[in-house]
Image: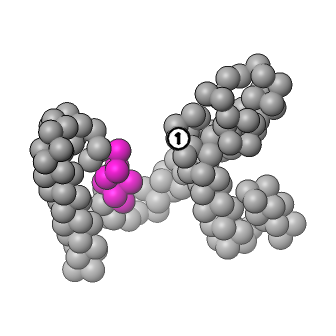
């Protein structure tokens, strides 16, 4: 880590994660849910913050930022392609989505996971906004099409 601001961000993220862990463990024992349930809940709820802490603690180099950007692009593309394939398969009853129709059951990589369709849509919208604002090398028409595809 390079500067005090970066250290401060990471320490606040880790402090929040520790508070989350404490609340989950106390709640699990209070409700007699057991330690394994507390661990599973913490990992499910805290995983995005753990990832943010890991990214924020890296010393940003052009190579690491490029790899992170490529990873993000690939993840979003896989999610979008899965969602695009799932919708017609669910609508034609070739893919069972736990009783959901093609709109509610289509969740990309978050297929049939409760709020998977909302998470998948949020991923698509966040990426479309990023793409529209930051990818100035692409023509404006392509950026507008990406935005409209996300919505």
- Viewer-closest of 107 and 7: 107
Judge whether residue 75 can be spotted in this image: no
**In the picture, residue 22 is in which quadrant?**
bottom left
What residue appears at the point 34 percent right and 58 percent down from the top-left corner? 49
Q: How is the image coloured?
A: one colour
**Is residue 49 magenta-colored?**
yes
Q: Give percent across and percent down for residue 137.
A: 74, 67
Q: Position of residue 106 (x, y in %)?
A: 68, 38
Query: In the current view of this chain or complex, which residue is farthest to the right?
Result: 141
Q: Quadrant of residue 133?
A: bottom right
In-front residue for pair 21/57? 21
- In the image, residue 12 sits, relative to residue 49, either above or below, namely below
Q: Nearer the viewer, residue 84 or 66?
A: 84
Residue 59 is one of the magenta-drawn residues: no
Name the spot of residue 100 as percent of width and height, x first. 67, 34
Magenta stretch: dominant secondary structure: helix
Q: Is residue 145 rendered to the left or right of residue 26?
A: right
Q: Residues within 10 Å of mark 1 (few under 14, many from 20)?
A: few
User: In the rendered picture of this protein, how many numbered marks are placed on residues?
Assistant: 1
Residue 42, percent across and down? 26, 47
Residue 15: name its quadrant: bottom left
- Give the residue at x 79% y 55%: 149
Q: Which residue is mark 1?
A: 114
Please say if 116 is above or below 18: above
Instruction: Give the magenta range.
Output: 44-52
Q: Is residue 79 above or below residue 48?
A: above
Q: Secondary structure at mark 1?
A: loop
- For the point 77% across and 26% down, which residue is it? 89
């Amino acid at each position: 880590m390079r500067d005090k601001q970066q250290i401060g961000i990471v320490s606040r993220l880790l402090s929040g994660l520790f508070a989350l862990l404490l609340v989950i463990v106390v709640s699990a024992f209070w409700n007699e849910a057991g330690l394994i349930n507390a661990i599973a809940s913490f990992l499910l709820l805290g995983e995005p913050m753990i990832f943010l802490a890991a990214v924020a603690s890296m010393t940003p180099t052009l190579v690491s930022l490029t790899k992170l950007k490529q990873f993000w692009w690939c993840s979003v593309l896989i999610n979008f392609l899965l969602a695009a394939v799932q919708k017609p398969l669910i609508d034609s009853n070739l893919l069972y989505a736990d009783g959901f129709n093609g709109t509610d059951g289509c969740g990309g990589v978050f297929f049939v996971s409760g709020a998977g369709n909302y998470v998948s849509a949020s991923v698509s919208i966040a990426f479309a906004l990023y793409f529209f604002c930051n990818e100035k090398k692409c023509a404006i028409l392509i950026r507008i099409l990406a935005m409209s595809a996300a919505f």
